[in-house]
Image: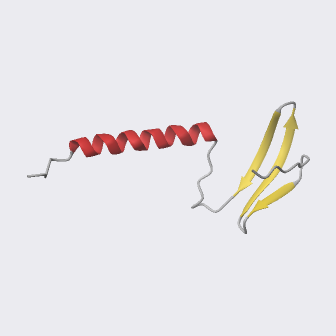
């Protein structure tokens, strides 16, 4: 893991098309501004995990609904 120290107002880049700016630091909270292309999905980790779980559940339900073709 790369660890980067930045102050409020400073920016760092990921690749050619993603930038992250430190907007504010208040105690142990940091406010970030993220600029990325529309096709790049940006989520907090807990939100991403919920999305992945829902997709997995939907795929399981869909596979159960398919008729058994092993005859």
Please identify the quarter of the rendering in which residue 55 is found. Answer: top left
Where residue 9 appears, x then y in whole percent? 89, 50
Would residue 26 appear left or right of 44 to someone viewing this image?
Answer: right
Residue closer to the observer: 1 or 52: 1
Residue closer to the observer: 49 or 43: 49
Would residue 48 appear left or right of 4 to someone viewing this image?
Answer: left
Outermost residue toward the bottom in this view? 16
Height in image: 26 above or below 42? above
Q: How many marks?
A: 0
Where residue 19 appears, x then y in whole percent? 76, 59
At horizontal 85% and vertical 41% (from top left) the residue drawn is: 24
Would residue 16 appear left or right of 66 to someone viewing this image?
Answer: right
Would residue 14 appear left or right of 5 to someone viewing this image?
Answer: left
Height in image: 42 above or below 60? below
At horizontal 75% and vertical 50% (from top left) the residue drawn is: 1
At horizontal 83% and vertical 46% (from top left) the residue drawn is: 23
């Amino acid at each position: 893991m790369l660890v980067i120290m930045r102050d409020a107002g400073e920016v760092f880049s990921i690749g050619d098309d993603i930038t992250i700016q430190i907007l504010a630091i208040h105690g142990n909270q940091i406010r970030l501004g993220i600029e990325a292309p529309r096709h790049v999905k940006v989520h907090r980790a807990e939100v991403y995990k919920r999305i992945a779980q829902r997709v997995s559940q939907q795929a399981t339900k869909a596979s159960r609904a398919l008729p058994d073709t092993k005859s």
